[in-house]
Amino acid sequence: MTPQRIAVIGAGAWGTALADSFSGIGHEVMLWVFEADLCARMASNRENDLYLPGIALHDDLRFTSDLAEAASAGQDFLVSVMPSHVVRAVWSKLAPSVHEETLITSATKGVEEGTLLLPTQVIAECLAGAGGGGRALACLSGPTFARELAERKPTAITTASDDAGAAKAIQEALAAPNFRIYTGADPVGVQLGGALKNVIALAAGIADGMELGHNARAALIVRGLAEIGRLGTAMGGRAETFAGLAGMGDLVLTCTGDLSRNRTVGVRLGKGEPLQKILESMTAVAEGVSTAPAAVGLADKFGVEMPVCREVHAILFEGRSPRDAVRDLMARPLKAELP
């Protein structure tokens, strides 16, 4: 494998784990860190003590808090890994510095509130505004806990693009012995699955916090997947995507794994803690909280029934109690499971 120059934009747990993985297979990697003080500590201590503590980072991994420097370091590949609510702000500054031949992939999981755009769509708008429109973009999503990738545990993920060559290039360059990458041609479905599974994970966590049992959790996972699939196909995604790694795979992981931030927030909500108190106690972002309004907005825009997502939104932002939400979900008119 020929070493590539890679910039990873965003040093949360996932961005840090990806950058470390790419360094571990011989690439020249620059990781952009928003917090200048954290950047200095990472360069000195070879550890992300804020978002991925206890993981020793590869000796060759480099760090910067300068966006222009990160872009210039990523002539071959640029991997965008940041919370969905800051994608536009970061890319508005980053876009003018990205080389026209750099292959861009987004590993952000979320939907931009207000515009209801997926991360690659936001990036495309920012690039077009900087005179760099019309280029191939890809996304990277699947059942992945950052810590497990950083510990070199077996992980599988999907990269999807409208450009088959771009997806293949990412697969060949970024896969590692413990990091298996599949290609796909459905960036809408892959990104939507990665975003909405966080909302369903909140629901699963709420059920667990209320001690509703395994039956309830399994039902939420399956009916949540049905909601994601309905919306995804209405938006032009492929139904089969939601049976794969970026759909069912990511959903099951996030709804059941103890490392899931969104499930953890849900558990605490189910036990009666106020949302604001929960969020103030967290360092990392629970994307499901910010994605819930977008999920409801997309359901309205495309005329899709999404009762679980609506109840999660009501718990988060409308003062509905979890018990009332469960009661209303169970009292919905009886229907056939499949159309």
Image (cartoon, helix red, strand yellow):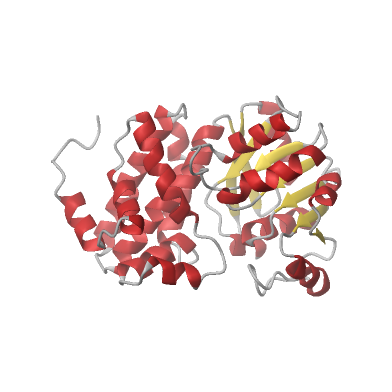
Figure quadrant of residue 173 = top right
Residue 299, quarter of the rendered image: top left
Asked whether residue 182 appears in the rendered view, the answer is no
Q: Is residue 25 toward the left or the right of residue 332 in the image?
A: right
Quadrant of the rendering where the C terminus is positioned: top left
Q: Is residue 196 left or right of residue 76?
A: left
Q: How far across and how far down the image is residue 305, in percent?
A: 29, 36
Residue 232 is left or right of residue 24, and the answer is left
In which quarter of the view is residue 20 placed?
bottom right
Residue at image location 52% in from the left, 33% down from the top: 188
* Rendered location of residue 100, percent (x, y): 81, 32
> Which of the pair 113/289 is nearer the observer?
113
Q: How many marks?
A: 0
Residue 316 position, x and y percent, is 36, 58
Query: Residue 109, relative to residue 234: is it above or below?
Result: below
| Quadrant that contains the N terminus | top right
Residue at 65%, 71% (x, y): give it: 50
Residue 140: in sight, yes or no?
Answer: yes
Can you say whether 247 is above or below 280 in the image? above
33 or 246, nearer to the observer: 33
Q: Residue at x 45, y 54 (%)?
A: 288
Left or right placement of residue 29 versus residue 205 in this view = right
Instruction: Depth check: give the residue in front, 286 or 52.
Output: 286
Q: Position of residue 228 (x, y in %)?
A: 39, 40
